[in-house]
Image: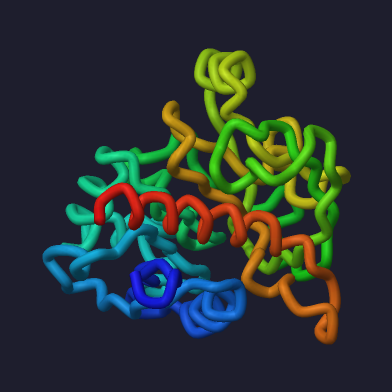
Amino acid sequence: MSDGRPRIAVVTFPGSNDDGDACLALSTLGADPVPVWHTAVELPHEVAGVVLPGGFSYGDYLRCGALASLAPVMDGVRAFAADGGPVLGICNGFQILCEARLLPGVLRANRQVQFVCADVAVTVESTETPFTAGCDLGDELVIPIKHGEGNWVADDETFADLVARGRVVLRYVDDVNGSRDRVAGVANEAGNVLGLMPHPEHAVDPLLGCVGGVPILVGLVAAARERSAALA
């Protein structure tokens, strides 16, 4: 950590296209983004947070995120998450986390079988994660979406368990893609891994539009800063 700015890894896979935007947003909000290529066998020294950005890793061949989940860097991401480090998967990053079994459920084609791109409202359903710790339950955040496979599904038992344990973190106000019970983001059991389909990195500058992504990324930066201080 330099000058109080925690180092946050932003992983790039072949086909990622929001990695630069994620780096810019994190830098704007007080972090030191560290680009990491998918072939890295471990995360850089002193990284205190990880972002898997949006895009179309490996052209979305096979299943979205399936090939990226097998990339060498994912062993480092798994170890980092298991150690309690904050990991945020955005859009394709959410798909990768599900395929890597770091998050439950799967993402499949939108109900309307069309690519959707719009500013949407989501409600905060849990504040028991570092990413939403600065929010209140029921807060409404406006954040852009842009995906063709954002329809999150899970079996009945898994879904009931997630709801009971507060692991459904964000819900769409409206049904935008057929996602079960309008789920927009889910967390792991410990709460340190969050996947969401909306793009918070595109919602941090009022000059460009909505700013609903600010509290989520600020929460990530704060968690990374705390981790850096604890490990110093």
Specify the farthest residue to the left: 41
Q: Does residue 109 appear anywhere in the picture?
A: no
Q: Is residue 151 left or right of residue 61?
A: right
Q: Nearer the viewer, residue 7 or 163?
A: 7
- Count every numbered label the image shows and give the total: 0
Place of residue 124 in the rendered image (x, y in percent of width and height, measured from the top left) = 75, 39
Q: Residue at x 87, y 45 (%)?
A: 174
Above or below, comparing residue 213 to residue 100 in the picture: below
Place of residue 36 in the rendered image (x, y in percent of width and height, measured from the top left) = 28, 76
Q: Residue at x 59, y 31 (%)?
A: 128
Above or below, comparing residue 105 to residue 195 in the picture: above
Q: Nearer the viewer, residue 146 or 142?
A: 142
Which quarter of the rendering shows the N terminus? Answer: bottom left
Q: Residue at x 61, y 23 (%)?
A: 166
Q: How is the image coloured?
A: rainbow
Place of residue 102 in the rendered image (x, y in percent of width and height, measured from the top left) = 36, 40
Quarter of the image where one finds residue 156:
top right
Place of residue 201 in the rendered image (x, y in percent of width and height, measured from the top left) = 62, 71
Which quarter of the rendering shows the C terminus? Answer: bottom left
Q: Is residue 119 left or right of residue 181?
A: right
Q: Does residue 14 appear anywhere in the picture?
A: yes
Q: Nearer the viewer, residue 160 or 86?
A: 86
Q: Is residue 97 left or right of residue 78?
A: right
Quarter of the image where one finds residue 169:
top right
Q: Residue at x 69, y 56 (%)?
A: 215
